[in-house]
Amino acid sequence: MKIKQITKMSTICEILNSCNVGKQMFKEFDKLIKLYLTVPVTTATAECGFSALNRLKTVFRNSMAQSRLNHCLIANIYKEKLDQTDPYQIMSTFIPSNGKRQSFFG
């Protein structure tokens, strides 16, 4: 089989299982493939998180508690998902859960 015909990991597994040497070496390749698949493809999410953290820390200059900073950071990182949520649905769940909120919001 030519290398150009290999397009999937399953093809490599089939080749290794077809010969005796491949079966013996497959254990090592299996470990290598599992290690390769556990490594993240990119670190963009982590880098984005650190950039957002730096921006928030610059704006607020350490005047907020760690828990509030974490909440702001999560909202900033996942802002695409947050933009897709319906605020009225959240309010309809949040307001009736407390009597003070019901009297305040009406």
Image: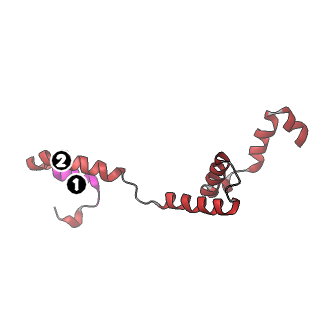
Q: Is residue 29 left or right of residue 78?
A: left
Q: Is residue 55 left or right of residue 27?
A: right
Residue hosting label 1? 12
Above or below — where is 54 with respect to 30? below
Q: Position of residue 88 (x, y in %)?
A: 78, 48
Q: CA distance from mark 1 to mark 2?
A: 10 Å
Give the mark toward the camera: 1 or 2.
Answer: 2
Q: Secondary structure at mark 2?
A: helix
Residue 63 placement: quadrant: bottom right
Q: Position of residue 18 (x, y in %)?
A: 13, 49
Q: Position of residue 103 (x, y in %)?
A: 90, 37
Q: Quadrant of the C terminus?
A: top right
- Is residue 106 visible in the rendered image? The answer is no
Label placed on residue 26: 2
Q: Magenta segment, principal secondary structure?
A: helix
| Residue in view at x 65 percent, y 60 percent | 56
Label placed on residue 59: none
Taking the view exactly as shown, the residue that stands out farthest to the front is 62
Residue type for callout 2: Phe
| Residue in view at x 60 percent, y 56 percent | 77
Numbered range of the magenta stretch:
7-17
| Residue in view at x 22 percent, y 54 percent | 12
The residue carrying pointer 1 sits among few (fewer than 14), some (14 to 19) or many (20 or more) residues within 10 Å by Cα, namely some
- Is residue 35 visible in the rendered image? The answer is yes
Q: Position of residue 101 (x, y in %)?
A: 85, 38
Q: Which of the pair 55/18 is nearer the observer?
A: 55
Residue type for callout 1: Ile
